[in-house]
Each structure stands twice: as structure tokens, then as C-alpha cells.
Amino acid sequence: MILCLVEPGELSLEALTFARRLGPVRAFSIEAGETYAPGAWAAAIVQLVEKHSPEAVVAAGSDRGQEAMAHAAARLDLALAANCISAEPGDPMTVVRQRWGGSLLEEAALSGRVKLLTVAPNVVAAEPDAAEVEVEAFAPTLSQSDLAVRVARREEQPPGAISLTEARVVVGGGRGVGSAEGFVLLEELATLLGGAVGGSRVVTNLGWRQHSDQVGQTGARIAPELYIACGISGAIQHIVGCRGAKKILAINKDRHAPIVARADYAVVGDLHEVVPAVIAELRR
């Protein structure tokens, strides 16, 4: 039997699909609300492992999934294989996982009485399951130390805002945008396309956009239908964040920029001329 940690969102559907390929699944969710505490999540995972003795525990490679599973692995004294894209049951279990921000794949043998895995985001296609679900409540025993670190509050997006991870179109800006004011153009384009605006790490480091807008290895990992990269060079850390996009359109003055080589379509030109022309055509 496979235990699978389920959170709201598409990534958990991917994790469930991954888990079902390993065997019968027992999914569990943890009500976090405003008080997410990694220690409490880890305690719940440990106690469920002790109760059910599963072959493996699978979680989505989300921020919370990665953190809670790392805590649980330490408490169980077991190895954790993070960012897996496939696995073959057995002892040891053979897993293939992303390393170095997805720039290479590693095949590894995972040993232990229980195999702990997280699933790389936006790699496994979620498959629906119409099976009937039986719900069972479980109340873990928590200590005060399990709640010592927890979310104090959340900064919500403005009403009507589209999140980067859910947007069908993302317009990204890099150093080539020139300034924080330069993002007004990108905001207008994103609005016309019903999308969201993101930025590279250098943009957030310069204070032109807030960190929550960052696309990349240390930011959001997106999977839109279309990613429009404006004035972004395309360092590997940024590619990690946008590799899930179905199509990439690069707008860049440098035809040799790495993002141009990665893109499905490219416009070689000044984004301050190209983007207004695209906006004008869309409005027309």
C-alpha cells in the first residue's frame, strides 16, 4: 500500500497519478489553513507510517510537500528521494529523479523499510480516477515543539488576480525590461491575454518585482499554455521554473541568448518596440 500526501492543487493530482503506478493508494490530507507547521505535518506522516506500514509515502514536490517530507525522513531515519519523475517498485526501489535544477536526470536505488518520495512538479501528467473514496479521520498526537515553527499569516493576492502557477499565459520580464516602470507594458499585455506577470531572479533582486513574482529554481515553477519571456537571458535557474510551459515565445535583442535556443518561437528585437506592437495588434 502507498500513502500519498494530498494538498489542494494540480501538483497533488500528479502525485496521486505517480503513486497509483506503484500500487494501491491511501491518500491523506492535512488541514493547514493559516497555521501550516512543517513539524506537525511531519509528525502526522510519521504516525501514519507507524499505523499503516506502507511500502512508500509519496508527496507532491511543492514547497510544503518537500519540507514536510524532509522533516519526516529525518524523524524516521530514512532516505528521501526528491523530485522523482518515475519509479519501479522493489527493494531497493529504482527511481529516476531530477538533479541540479532539472539539468540532468539521476537513476538511483532507494532502500529502506519505507520509501519516501516527492514528485517533480509539472512532469507527470495527472490522470483522473473515478474510484469511490472512503474517508477516515485521523488525529495525530502533537507536541508543542511540533508547532514551534508555523505560518503566522498569509499575504493574499488582490481580488481577481491570477496566480503564476495557475495562469494559462505568463508574461515574464528580465533585466532587459529596464526598470520597475517598464513592467507596465508587460502588465498590459498580460491583462489582454488573461494572464499573469512574472520576472527573473535579477528583477526581484533589483526590487522591480516582489519575490512572489519570481519564476525559477528559487521561485515559482509554472506550466502555462504560453510563456512570453521578455528581455530574459534564460539562465538554467530560470529555465527550471518555466520548463513546464507548453510553448515559449522569447522576445530578445540577443539572438544568441539561451532563452532563444529554448524557445518554440522567438522575436529578435527590442521588447520596448515589439511588445507595444503586439498590444496594438491585440487591441485592433
Image: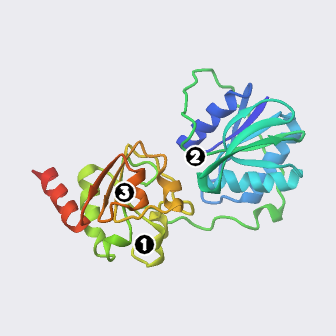
In this view, which residue lies farthest toward the left? 284
For label 3, the crowd category at 10 Å Cα-Cα, with few meaning under 14, some 14 to 19 and many 20 or more, is: few
Q: Which mark is residue 171?
A: none
**Mark 3 lies on residue:** 161
Q: Is residue 160 visible?
A: no
Please give the name of the residue rendered at 74% of the width and 39% of the height, measured from the top-left corner. 95
Between 219 and 38, the one nearer to me in the picture: 219
Quadrant containing the N terminus in the rendered view: top right
Between 104 and 202, the one nearer to me in the picture: 104
**Mark 2 lies on residue:** 121
Residue 69: horizontal and vertical position, in percent? 75, 51
In which quadrant of the rendered view does residue 123 lie?
top right
- The answer to whether 252 appears left or right of 114 in the picture is left
Residue type at mark 2 is Pro
Residue 129: horizontal and vertical position, in percent? 58, 24
Tell me the CA gap for discs 3 and 2.
22 Å
In this view, which residue lies farthest toward the top? 131
- Dot 3: element: loop
In which quadrant of the rendered view does residue 264 lie?
top left
Residue type at mark 3 is Ala
Please give the name of the residue rendered at 81% of the width and 35% of the height, measured from the top-left corner. 93
- The answer to whether 254 appears left or right of 101 in the picture is left
Dots 1, 2 in contact, CB < 8 A: no
Colour approach in the figure: rainbow
